[in-house]
Amino acid sequence: ATTFVGGLTGNVTGNISGATGTFTGDLVGVAASFSGNVTVGGTLTYEDVTNVDSTGIVTAKGGVRIPNDTGTITMGTGSDLQLYHDGSNSYINNTFATGDLIIDSAQNFYIKHSGEKQIQAVNDGTVILYYDNTEKFRTTTSGATITGAGICTSLAVGPGIVQEDYHSYGTAL
């Protein structure tokens, strides 16, 4: 038959073109071409696929997961920005880029280790450096504040003042 109307059961060899309808069970083939939209109501699984090419925006509603230590998220025409884990360390790699790595936040920005602050940048304000989660250095509108001892190998104070080395040989100044 060159045309038919109704259900299709059994095995088919050759091409099916111009058919519309609902297929139940497994649809197995060597190749398929679709000229319209394809909707999958469930899970679409790719097995043994090395590349998935997409033109446009890919939306991953549940996140993107690379389940091994050899995967890299790469962006830019020259692999400018890379995000990866090598099995021991995690990296944000900007070494192939021609520009700077800019972390832009509308709110405060923190670098932490195990929940302890190391660097804090306050929106439109101060930058604070921490040692063992304790504030040690803070920028202010007039300069900087150091909490604790400041150790300098040399010190220049203002323009026109001679720079001198200071050596303390006593227990008090």
Image: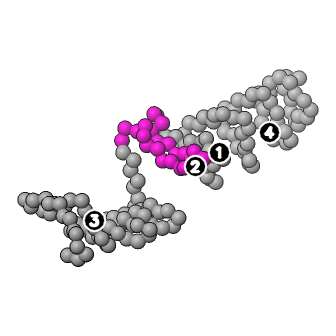
Labelled disc at residue 88: 2
Labelled disc at residue 151: 3
Relative image position of residue 35 (x, y in whole percent)? 66, 32
What is the CA distance from the residue labelled 4 to the residue labelled 2?
52 Å
Of the two numbered discs 1 and 3 on the same chain, state the one appearing first in sequence: 1
Number of residues whose C-alpha sits closer than 10 Å to that of mark 3, classed few (under 14), some (14–19) or many (20 or more): few
Of the pair 33 and 75, the residue shown nearer to us: 75
Describe residue 21's horizontal placement relative to residue 146 as left or right. right
Of the two numbered discs 1 and 4 on the same chain, state the one appearing first in sequence: 4
What is the CA distance from the residue labelled 3 to the residue labelled 2?
35 Å
In this picture, which residue range is highlighted in magenta?
77-99
What residue would you read off at disc 4? 21
Give the foreground label among 1 and 3.
3
Mark 1: which amino acid? Asn
Mark 4: which amino acid? Gly
Mark 2: which amino acid? Ser
